[in-house]
Image (cartoon, grey):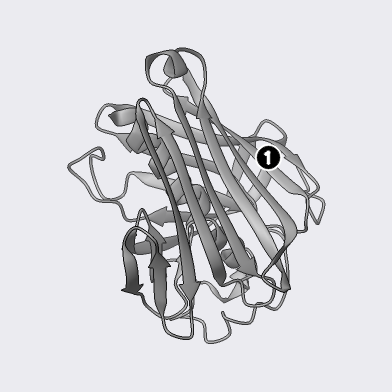
Amino acid sequence: MKCIKIFNILFLIVSTISIWAEQNPNSDKPSKVTFKSGEKLIYKLHYGFINGGNATLTVDEQTFGNQKVFYAKAYAKTTGITNTLFPIEDSYESYFDKKTGLPYKAVRNISEGGYKYYSEDYFVHADTVVTNKKHGRKKVPVNTLDMVSSLYFLRNIDADTLKKGDVVNFTTWFADEIFPFYLRYKGKEIVTTKFGKVRCLRFDPVVEPGRIFKSEDDMSFWVTDDSNMIPVLIEFDLIVGSVKCELIEYKNIKSEIHWN
């Protein structure tokens, strides 16, 4: 189903922007924290002229084991006619270290039409393995992140080290598999949003053509070029149409965004 794939892509790109560990030797020690407990970001998904659904990203502080960690959740739900035709309600959760950004636990809980799936992954970074009750232990690359924690990990990286045209290789754990990705940094651009215009950093993930994309360059996303690095817009062209995901509401961000 196209709708399922669109929502999975939405999660993957909103929540899995990048891991720079191989490119940046200091990436395992973020120099700043660009978000705070209580932050909430809300997005609307448009399929052409149709409002397909909403997605929400939240982060709070919780206790995991005997230590304080960040707990982040990505949640998406279809609305309107899309929900009538094929209802989707998916959530992804991550418990990750406040200092390193590396995850301890990830939860995937999806409901797509009549299909339901729930799983929990536990990361043991010292052994470079992920443990899942259904699939056992699997070896993963060093500093592997889950979908949700990777977003917040990126937002703590010094973007000033990036140069236009840089291509970054990275991996993430998604849907019980290791996923390799390639990401192109395209430079700075002004993006028009419902709040006004804002200067952003643009990234173009290299996607796989032939299934739902026409070419490998059919997806772009923009994050604010400030101390928040908040994703404000995602656009991708599919064989059957175009999709846009835009920020429509935000609460409790750490620093003020300067809209023009």
Looking at the picture, does residue 255 appear above or below residue 41? below
Residue 187 rendering spot, x and y as whole percentages: 51, 60
Q: Quadrant of the C terminus?
A: top right
Give the class, few, some or many, for how many residues have Cα within 10 Å of label 1's Cα (few <14, many ≥20): few
Q: Residue at x 82, y 51 (%)?
A: 256
Looking at the picture, does residue 139 appear above or below residue 232? below
Amino acid under label 1? Lys
Residue 108 rendering spot, x and y as whole percentages: 46, 49
Looking at the picture, does residue 213 appear above or below residue 173? above
**Image side of residue 66 versus residue 11, left or right:** right
Farthest residue, direction left: 210
Is 60 or 237 nearer to us in this picture?
60
Numbered label tally: 1
Residue 10 in view in this figure: yes
Mark 1 = which residue?
197
Looking at the picture, does residue 222 appear above or below residue 95? above
Q: Quadrant of the N terminus?
A: top left
Farthest residue, direction front: 133
Residue 225 in view in this figure: no
Residue 232 rendering spot, x and y as whole percentages: 60, 44
Residue 37 rendering spot, x and y as whole percentages: 77, 56
**Image side of residue 138 versus residue 130, left or right:** left
Label 1 sits on a secondary structure element that is: strand
**Image side of residue 77 versus residue 35, left or right:** left
Q: Residue at x 56, y 61 (%)?
A: 149
Q: Residue at x 23, y 39 (%)?
A: 214
Q: Residue at x 24, y 45 (%)?
A: 215
Is 196 or 25 nearer to us in this picture?
25
**Image side of residue 37 versus residue 162, left or right:** right
